[in-house]
Image (spheres, helix red, strand yellow):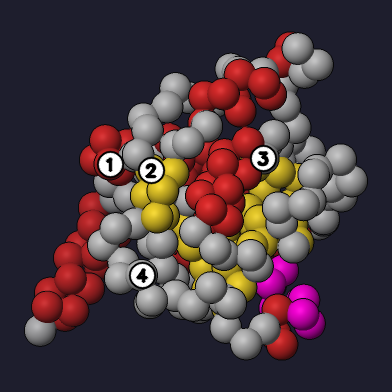
Amino acid sequence: MFKKIRDFFYRLVDCIFPKFCIECKKEGEFLCEECFNKIRKFKNPEFKNIDSGLFKMIIIPCPFHKNPVLRKGLHAMKYKFYKEICGILAMLIKEAINGICELKAAERLIIVPMPLHKKRIKFRGFNQAEELAKHTGLPVFNLLIRIKQTKSQATLTKTQRMQNIKDAFCINPKIPPDTVSKNTTIILLDDVCTTFSTIRSAALALQKNGFRKIIACAAAYAELHQNNRNK
Ligand SMILES: [Zn+2]
């Protein structure tokens, strides 16, 4: 019954506020299939300079600055609160994960979305990393919480970002200790990675609690703004 009422409500909202593709402006979806396929054309950046001691693997399907459609999609998701785009962008992550044999063979594999501070969730209404995670089809655990409300990383240098985000995460006390075995392969998921300082800080919190099989994953990789490099 609730589902029927909800679906009716969504259809009503669609009639009052029709959706337009963020790229070609065609009516129907926030990102039409044709424009979504433009994102796919830009593939896998390489991460040679990332200290990989902490991560077993880094999975990021798309570079960001060179990919104008993806940039618009991420912006609409994060700043215009288009939750629906999470489902579309999650397809990129799902395809990337499914293409890795080692992950198919993993005995137990879960996704841990990067947590937002509760004040940020209140403001946006949802955690975009959690929404992306839900659409991958893998089990999702909110194993981490964010205990420090940090400044936006956008204008900071690499060093400032590391300092800003230090000790910002801890294990979610609401999850009973033995729910997730220490042997589980954890895909730590964020929407965008730039210097990897946020995802590293979260991975350190997992490592401190005995988790060793950690994979960093994001929909996109963004290069640090030129003004903030090498400072
Ligand atoms: Zn389009």
Point out which mark residue 93 bears: none
Residue 15 in magenta?
no
**Is there CB contact under 8 Å for labels 2 and 1?**
yes
Return the residue at label 2: 146
Please rate how many residues cluster around mark 2, counting C-alpha atoms within 10 Å: few if below 14, some from 14 to 19, many from 20: some
Return the residue at label 4: 177
Q: What residue type is labelled 3?
A: Phe
Return the residue at label 1: 118
Please rate how many residues cluster around mark 4, counting C-alpha atoms within 10 Å: few if below 14, some from 14 to 19, many from 20: few
Secondary structure of residue under mark 3: loop
User: For the C terminus, which image quadrant?
Assistant: top right
Give how far apart the Cα atoms at labels 4 and 3 are. 27 Å
Q: Residue 81: horizontal and vertical position, in percent?
A: 37, 43
Can residue 154 be spotted in the picture?
no
Q: In this view, does 95 lie above or below 20?
A: below
Q: Is residue 101 left or right of residue 115?
A: right
Secondary structure of residue under mark 1: helix
Please provide the residue range marked out in magenta. 95-102
Residue in the picture at 51% in, 31% down:
165
